[in-house]
Image (tube, rainbow, N blue to C red):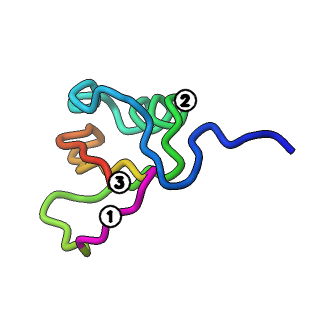
Amino acid sequence: MSSLPNPPGRNPSDDLDAYPGLALEEAERRARERGWTTVRSLPPEAVVTMEFVAGRLNFTVAEGRVRRCWQG
């Protein structure tokens, strides 16, 4: 059995400031390559719950570009 790129319960070491401004497709590809197990794209002003999920990267996306990025 192969190992997971990012074991459960951990976030990859990544520069989250590198994502804003990227096209959504590029940002999602880059996030998966860097080991994020879940990538979630949300519209501006989306209402989301506050639970923290290790290994998840969240994007706020407008006009096809990442505007904000945060983990959990």
User: What's the distance in space between the residues labelled 2 and 1, CA to CA?
Assistant: 21 Å
Q: Position of residue 38 (x, y in %)?
A: 49, 53
Q: Position of residue 50 (x, y in %)?
A: 23, 71
Magenta portion: prevailing SS class: loop
Mark 1 and mark 2 in contact (Cβ < 8 Å)? no
Looking at the image, residue 12 lies above or below residue 15: below
Tell me if 35 is positioned left or right of 58 in this view. Answer: right
Q: Quadrant of residue 68?
A: top left
Q: Check disc 3 and report the residue beneath it.
A: 41
Q: Position of residue 34 (x, y in %)?
A: 49, 29
Residue stretch in magenta = 50-55
Crowding near pointer 2: few (<14 within 10 Å), some, many (20+)?
A: few
Q: Nearer the viewer, mark 2 or mark 1?
A: 1
- Identify the residue shown where x is 26% and y is 24%: 18
Q: Check disc 2 and report the residue beneath it.
A: 33
Crowding near pointer 1: few (<14 within 10 Å), some, many (20+)?
A: few
Amino acid under label 1? Phe
Work out whether mark 3 precedes mark 1 in sequence or the reverse, and give the earlier one.
3
Secondary structure beneath label 1: loop
Q: Check disc 1 and report the residue beneath it.
A: 52
* Quadrant containing the C terminus in the rendered view: bottom left
Magenta stretch containing residue 24, yes or no?
A: no
Amino acid under label 3? Ser
Amino acid under label 2? Glu
Crowding near pointer 3: few (<14 within 10 Å), some, many (20+)?
A: some
The mark tally for this picture is 3
Secondary structure beneath label 2: helix
